[in-house]
Image (cartoon, helix red, strand yellow):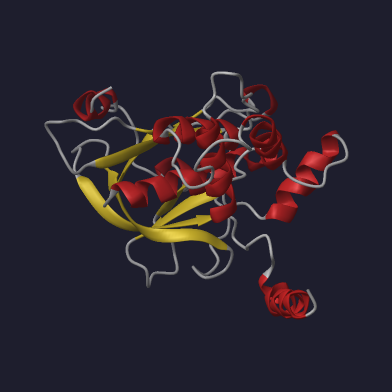
Amino acid sequence: MSGLCVFAARSKSMVMGEVSRGPCRPGSPSLQEGALKAGWLKKQRSIMKNWQLRWFVLRSDHLYFYKDEEETKPQGFIPLQGCQVNEISANPDEPGRHLFEIVPGGIGEKDRAPISHESFLLMANSQTDMDDWVKAIRRVIWAPFGGGIFGQRLEDTVQFERKFGPRLAPLLVEQCVDFIRERGLDEEGLFRMPGQANLVKELQEAFDCGDKPLFDSNTDVHTVASLLKLYLRELPEPVIPFSKYEDFLTCNSWVHKYT
């Protein structure tokens, strides 16, 4: 759907946060407390269809927006529980608009109370910024369902997946490593040659949405290797924790010294 069509489809949408300004509004602690991500985004107003630049803060399962980054009281917020976040296809007639929407419904609908708000349309200042926001919001939405693993702490992912059986590493890591050991050990340029970028993104989004996509004989091993590298690169702390980094270097020096 083009950007113009999306705008037209929202002629009846409400101003973001209006539906959340009742007595059930959650507390709004300081911006630094528990913030998962913060930054500037533009939000579309409902009637005039113009854009407002606001400071957004992702905290817990709500996305707050403020007039500026110095404000302590938010103008409103978007409840994320049970929502989906989608990137809007670029409109060639409007280049430079990096749009995404937060849509209620679609996740755990049978187990949650109805959500009264409609879709929210947001604009980032770059493709990279939009990608970062979409990943962060998806991580919040899907974490309770075993998704949102890219950028999630390693121990949190393993702890969740242990509910379904013994596990020493995330399922994604085991699946990638098993596939690479089976099909990629003789492949030239493994972990050096890039995989198919669009397929890597599709697989990342599938794992982040709680799915467990399977690799088959048609899956490119370089794509799987790129997916594994991407997962490791986005860990908030490396596989070798910061606290053990010096110990690791010391151990490595002893190995070289006595071999």
Would residue 61 be visible to someone looking at this image?
Answer: no
Q: Is residue 60 above or below residue 180?
A: below
Q: Nearer the viewer, residue 175 or 189?
A: 189
Q: Nearer the viewer, residue 220 or 76?
A: 220
Quarter of the picture containing the N terminus is: top left
Task: Give the quarter of the image for residue 149.
Answer: top right
The residue at the point 74 percent across, 54 percent down is 155
Q: Nearer the viewer, residue 42 or 98?
A: 98
Q: Is residue 248 above or below residue 47?
A: below
Query: Residue 75, position in %: x, y?
Result: 39, 56
Would residue 49 be visible to someone looking at this image?
Answer: yes
Query: Residue 187, position in %: x, y?
Result: 55, 36
The residue at the point 69 percent across, 30 percent down is 182
Query: Residue 116, position in %: x, y?
Result: 49, 31
The residue at the point 54 percent across, 51 percent down is 25
The residue at the point 72 percent across, 43 percent down is 170
Q: Is residue 37 left or right of residue 149?
A: left
Q: Residue furthest right?
A: 166
Q: Is residue 90 left or right of residue 148?
A: left
Q: Residue furthest top?
A: 217
